[in-house]
Amino acid sequence: MMMPSGVAEHIAASKPAEGEFAFTGPRGAVRSAGRTAPVASGTQDSLDERIARAFRHAGPRAIIGGALPFSRHQADHLWCAEGGSTMVHAAVGAGPIATTLRMNAAPSPRDYAGSVAKALELIRQDAAHQDGLRKIVLARTLAVSASDPISIAGLMSRLADDDSVTAFQVALPGNGPSPRHLVGATPELLIEKRGRAILSNPLAGSIRRCAGPAEDAQACGELARSDKDRREHAMVVEYILDQLSPWCRRLGSPEGTRLTSTRSMWHLHTRIVGELLDDSVPVPVLAAALHPTPAVCGLPCQRAADLISQLEPVARDFYAGAVGWCDNRGDGAWYVAIRCADICGREARLYAGAGIVEGSDPMIEAAETGSKFAAMLAALGLPADAALTD
């Protein structure tokens, strides 16, 4: 993860605690500081103007951070921190998260597999059509209840212990008595901008890691040889290259597709690098132009999004959207909002999804979502494999 050079004063190897927004990863951390106010909410069409207006009324050190929802038709939630960023040091794993946790799946792994089977039938029916459904990403959720309010700072600290991911938290809109936050540990960089230079690192195609070195190496090899996962990944890379191309004078993926890992998963990934035609474009505008990618939605995107609303029993809201930050030059980083939970007081809703393409197996995809819950479940103090069974 690269951070723009103009915000070096905001970067340190530390773990931020609770605030309006916070991000911490391999290269450092950014957290809102000073007087913080919400940016006027809206959709993608007005994002550029709303960001510019917020910076005009803020100090020179201001940064904007927040979340874009999964749906392009839903309003975003952004904050402008006039004091820029500050660091809060916290010991990894400090403090209790919560006690007496209870968990309910929606849908269950079995019902989720049924939805995958329906999606596969739609893909087969569309196979003869040029613009037919080629991929759909289906998610399921876990509702977790605790006897005490869940500690956002403690959860962030535990998630940040994995230096292969970017831990994040963003305060969300809510009308209840308790504050609401989106908290997670994402491995996927949607878009980063530093002057004219941009970087995207999409992930698609995954397999669960194993405890034993030999078994883990075997899982890695299976993913590398998987035609189904290679096809799924290629769809995402092609889409991102197509979407970024009009903004760039140079764009490519010189390293090709490789393997990467978090503590719980292996992934296929491709580093996409480019040079913008106009370095004044704010990075959230680029993020909004890319999102949602086929890594979290499908292809064609609108058809997949429509089917997602029919096949998933729980609305995504800010899950599978984007989270990130930018400075007043438009430089910053935005990440895909996956491996996360929507937390309000004693309640948390965890999300995980899997890409469905021709050749997918419903029960294997259900197991993949179960594995993707592992990081959040472990951080909450629940068994990492708790979502693998009905």
Image (cartoon, rainbow, N blue to C red):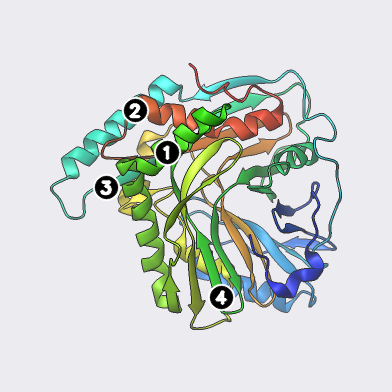
Q: In this view, does 261 lie to the left or right of 35?
A: left
In the rendered image, which residue does mark 3 sit on? 134
Q: Residue at x 49, y 61 (%)?
A: 271
Label 1: state its secondary structure. helix
- For the N terminus, the quadrant is bottom right
The quadrant holding residue 28 is bottom right
Residue 230 drawn at (x, y percent): 34, 47
- 208 above or below 90? above
Quote the CA–CA distance across marks 3 and 1. 25 Å
Q: Do the residues labelled 2 and 3 touch (CB within 8 Å)?
A: no
Label 2: state its secondary structure. helix
Disc nearer the start of the sequence (2/3):
3
Mark carried by residue 221: 1
In the rendered structure, which amino acid carries the disc numbered 1? Gly
Residue 36 drawn at (x, y percent): 79, 61
Mark 4 crowdedness (10 Å alpha carbons): few <14, some 14-19, many ≥20: some
Q: Which residue is drawn at 79% across and 78% down?
A: 60
Q: Are marks 2 and 1 in contact (CB under 8 Å)?
A: no
Comparing 271 with 363, the one in front is 271
Q: In this view, does 310 lie to the left or right of 141?
A: left
In the rendered image, which residue does mark 4 sit on? 197
Mark 3 crowdedness (10 Å alpha carbons): few <14, some 14-19, many ≥20: many
In the rendered structure, which amino acid carries the disc numbered 4? Ala
Disc nearer the start of the sequence (3/1):
3
Mark 1 crowdedness (10 Å alpha carbons): few <14, some 14-19, many ≥20: few
In the rendered image, which residue does mark 2 sit on? 362
Residue 300 drawn at (x, y percent): 30, 53
Label 3: state its secondary structure. loop
Q: Is residue 294 left or right of residue 341?
A: left
